[in-house]
Amino acid sequence: MPNYYLDIETTGLEPIDHKVITIQWCEIERYTGKKVGELNILKEWESSEREILEEFADAVTLTDPYAFTFIPIGYNLGFEHKFLSYRSDFHKTFPIEINTRPHIDLHQLAILLNGGEFKGTKLNDMTNKPSDGKSIPSWYENKEFDKINEYIIKEADEFIGFIEWAYETVPTLSPKLKDHFNN
């Protein structure tokens, strides 16, 4: 059951009006959260949106009927699901559905760590990620692809640091939870 960090970059927030310009993923060690292998980045500007969607589905074996062959781990995976589902349907490629398969979304953990408050729980609020990605569409329009690539690498590093911390820290809370309910 391989776990995979998953993220995308887009030209905006609405899949009807905007497109997926990158899909990035890497395998995450199941028990530690550590990165296994290299970060894969598919770039629309090097081929097309349709091609990166197809290449991604093939690379992570989404066509395998066994749902546990690809378990995405991300931050606010609803966004990825919305875009990948709509854009794969738009291009009539293999349907890419994230929220209909086993997945782990660390945004919920961030909300709990923030006392149940949603405000202040973006990945750049919780880690050393330098920004929230609002510059991506203008970088794309201006063909500043190197800036997008640098952003993706930094974001992946920060997310993986967060997941490593979560895998190390959260299991230590289990005995406290059991004690709480046994008292």
Image (cartoon, rainbow, N blue to C red):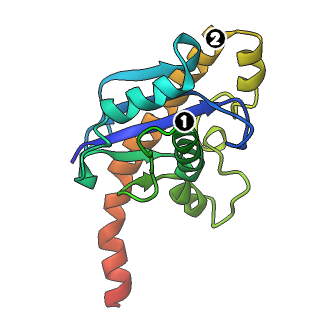
Q: Which mark is drawn over residue 44?
A: none
Q: Amino acid at mark 2?
A: Phe
Image side of residue 57 versus residue 145, left or right = left
Distance in Å between CA atoms under marks 2 and 1: 24 Å
Q: Which residue in the rendered view is the most extreme toward the bottom?
A: 183
Choose between 89 and 127: the one closer to the eye: 89
Residue 137 horizontal/vertical position (percent): 74, 25
Q: Residue at x 55, y 29 (%)?
A: 155
Q: Give the percent coordinates (x, y) of residue 129.
A: 61, 31
Q: Which quarter of the picture shows residue 128? A: top right
Label 1 amino acid? His
Q: Which numbered disc flags the more N-terminal residue, 2 or 1?
A: 1
SS at mark 2 in the image? helix
Q: Quadrant of residue 14?
A: top right
Picture coordinates of residue 113, whole percent (x, y): 56, 59
- In the picture of the structure, the residue carrying the numbered disc 1 is 91
Q: Above or below — where is 36 with respect to 99?
A: above
Task: Tell me what residue is drawn at x 45 percent, y 51 percent.
Answer: 97
Horizontal relation, residue 121 to residue 44: left or right: right
Q: Which residue is mark 2?
A: 145
Task: Answer above or below: position of 34 versus 30.
Answer: above
